[in-house]
Amino acid sequence: MAAQLDWKNLGFGYIKTPYRYTARYRDGKWDEGRLTDEDKIVISECAGVLQYAQTAFEGLKAYTTRDGKIVTFRPDLNAERMEQSAARLEMPVFPREKFLEAVDMVVAANRDYVPPYGSGATLYIRPFMFGSSEVIGVKPAKEYEFRMFCTPVGPYFKGGIKPISIRVSDFDRAAPHGTGHIKAGLNYAMSLHAIVDAHEKGFDENMYLDAATRTYVEETGGANFLFVTGDGKIVTPKSDSILPSITRQSLCYVAEHILGMTVEHRPVKFEEVAGFAECGLCGTAAVISPVGKIDDHGREILFPSGMDEMGPVTKKLYDTLTGIQMGTLPAPQGWIREIK
């Protein structure tokens, strides 16, 4: 029986669901893993995650399609990206097939919390891994726990897909040759002050420039940029410090192979930004959030698409990708995984 929630008015917040998945790494191997109804974690006060932030996470969604199926979108790429994050943080890699199995188990066990088709809500899935054994010297933990929970969510930004305003941040998101390209918790911890400060000053997000020269666009605290030129070309910033967004990758494929657009993935100088016709932030949580205005220390960059609605190219990309996710448009092979 479906959970009794106000699906159309959900925010992007945590609602406890009945089941989650857990697996433990000890003595050089992962155990079988299992579902549990226990949402509390008990660890040592000296656990590696608490002392040296040895943790990584992922984010993906499950949807109810138009024909009533429950599906996930490209979870294999989340598994792959988590492998990369774990390796960079000296954590054991959680096997890809086990990751996909865990996604299937968690969604199936909580199927009553998958929002209905047309509600605008989705089931957000959060896999994460952390060092659980005691560490006092600066070194990797010896034991780890992999967990996965899910929660029904509404739009990431309160306005839904209405254009947002962002600012150019004076803070740096990631150092050159650092950890900006992996989904490590420490990256997000260092962005918290910047996002709180932005919100206090009336902005929805920060635009981070490259830390080395502060001349190239990188990303925001939790999403990649996507720009549209006046002649309809898609441009996304390229940098070794940017998290490789699965949503951005999918949007670029849609643009090039389904909609017949030209796509460029290249370094983008900040001085170019004022010349773009549209701007969006792309990521799992929001798919695309249109940007209407960027504040550069008091100088406003206003996009022709405006502050009232998505620009036409961004809207076409959004409608096509969400149509694929929701089953109203055919999906490229391997993009949709049905939950039985």
Image (cartoon, rainbow, N blue to C red):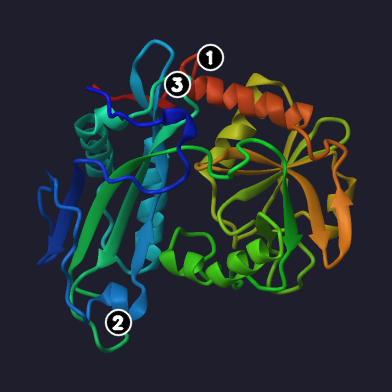
Residue 160 visible somewhere in the drawing:
yes
Give the total number of marks visible in the rendering.
Answer: 3
Would residue 283 appear left or right of 144 to someone viewing this image? Answer: right
Name the residue carrying label 3: 333
- Residue at 19 percent of width and 46 percent of height: 21
| Quarter of the image where the N terminus is located | top left
What residue does disc 2 label?
139
Label placed on residue 329: 1
Q: Residues within 10 Å of mark 1 (few under 14, many from 20)?
A: few
Determine whether the residue tagged by mark 2 lies in a helix, strand or loop: loop
- Determine the secondary structure under disc 1: loop
The answer to whether the residues at label 3 and label 1 have Cβ atoms under 8 Å apart is: no
In-front residue for pair 336/322: 322
**Mark toward the start of the polypeptide (3 vs 2):** 2
In-front residue for pair 59/87: 59
- The amino acid at mark 3 is Gln
> Of the residues shown, which amino acid type is indicated by label 1?
Leu
Q: Indicate whether 21 appears above or below 306.
A: below
Residue closest to the eye, 335 or 125: 125
For the residues carrying marks 1 and 2, which lies nearer the camera in this image?
A: 1
Q: Quadrant of residue 292?
A: top right
Q: Give the residue type at disc 2.
A: Lys
Relative height, residue 220 to residue 89 (above, below): above
Q: Callout 3: helix, strand or loop?
A: loop
Please report the residue visible at 21 percent of the width from the left and 61 percent of the height from the top: 145
Give residue 333's position: percent from left, percent from top.
45, 21
